[in-house]
Amino acid sequence: MSELAQRTEPAWAAVISVTLGVFGLVTAEFLPASLLTPMASDLGITEGMAGQAVTVTAAIALMTSLLITAVMRGIDRRLVLLAFSALLVVSNLMVALAPSLTVLLTGRVLLGVALGGFWTMSVATIMRLVPEERVPRALSIMFSGVSVATIAAAPMGSYFGDLIGWRNVFLAASLLGLLAFATQYATLPRMAPSGVTRLRTLFDVLIRPRVGLGMLAAGLVFTGHFAFFTYIRPFLETVTGVGVSGIATILLGFGVANFVGNLLAGTLIERSLRLTLVVAPLLMGTLALSLASQGGVAVLDGALVALWGLAFGAIPVAWSTWLSRTVPDEAESAGGLLVAAIQLAIATGAAAGGLIVDVSGVTWVFIASGGILLLASLVIVSGVQTRVAAAA
């Protein structure tokens, strides 16, 4: 009998420790966005050069997500997760103490390894910590760490950066990573590698019936979301016509609603995963088109953006649950493919959105986003299954 089948009691403390790891990683990922100006000034570089701290992390996370399960295939997963949390601590310390851009980018490379690796193994880890019927609820807890980091990282990074300096903010982030490491050390059980994971395994998983279609649909959903979210500020400035305080309020509303969506996702998915997968992007696409056609009233736009956050809160939980049900025997490899698809979608959504903004204006980004999300719903309806896929 597999280790997954033997799990009869949920290890909620271990789930919380994984959530802390997610919170620490996403917080570290988002911090430079709110601290670019003081970082660039202190290091004597341009803000554009400092912004490569974000680019290099995403690029390394993408590569790591595809390679990590094959490279680490013989190692206890508890030790692997602890190693990623240790890298989070080291990365933040290197950035905090960096005397040059080279050292700072090296620290962010380590963060990319930790981010891509931890995300790749997170769903498979949750599957081994709780019984099968509790997986959606456990995933919603884990992804609440993302929502809290989204709400807290940028405004708190900016606020505390002014009070104590950007370097001390990263020192504080290293302490958060240390807390995650200590909690995981105390609660995570030993987890022997499951499945036979090689680079070939990624391809074998991808060609299973309907798995590739599911990855395509997930990629479309995240592309549509990040095309929308990357350019929400210029839309609010130019179309809605709100100032900095108004933008901050609307984005806070998005973050809070996103957190609530994470918490509700487990219950919705337990009732119907397929319906959740279809309805969430359908609602988001409708909201994007509504903003594009009716935007201009601050209260209404704020409400629509908050509804978007609520709907998107269910997306990561739903697709991670889909992965756990569709490829339970190779969840790590499938997790790597899903993380890679999301990272590629982030880059594609942001890059394509930028081209559309330059050529046609920000409203057309929302139209394109809505179209992509409605297409994603159609793809899901047409053939994305939510049952276990047979091995090829």
Image: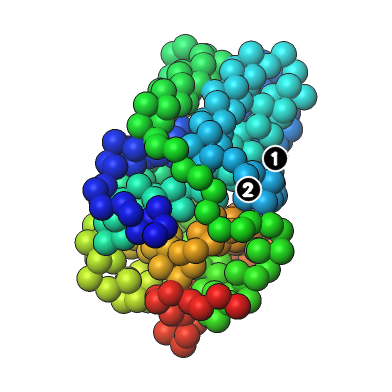
Question: Is 176 on the left-hand or right-hand side of 44?
Answer: left
Residue 167: % across, % down: 56, 16
Numbered disc total: 2
Image color mode: rainbow
Residue at image mark 1: 56
Residue under the point 64% across and 19% down: 94
Q: Residues within 10 Å of mark 1 (few under 14, many from 20)?
A: some
* Amino acid type, residue under disc 2 in the picture: Arg
For the question of whether residue 186 can be seen, the reply is: yes
- Does residue 377 appear in this view? no
Say which element carries label 1.
Answer: helix
- At 67% from the left and 51% from the top, the residue drawn is 70
* Disc assigned to residue 91: none
In which image quadrant can residue 346 be found? bottom right
Residue 273 vertical placement versus 235 (above, below): below
Q: In the depicted view, which residue is nearer to us: 127 or 23?
A: 127
Apparent side of residue 194 relative to residue 249 in the rendered image (left or right)? right
Q: Which mark is residue 73?
A: 2
Query: Would you call the spot at circle 2 few (<14 residues within 10 Å), some (14-19), or many (20 or more)?
Result: some
Residue 316 spot, x, y in % from top left:
42, 58
**Label whose residue precedes the other's in the sequence (1 or 2):** 1
Q: Residue at x 72, y 28 (%)?
A: 106
Of helix, strand and loop, which one carries label 2? loop
- As drawn, the residue found furthest toward the bottom would be 382
If the image is split into quadrants, where does the N terminus sit?
A: bottom left
Give the quarter of the image for residue 136.
bottom left
Asked whether 185 or 259 is in front, the reply is 185
Q: Quadrant where the C terminus lies?
A: bottom right
Distance CA(mark 1)–CA(mark 2)? 25 Å
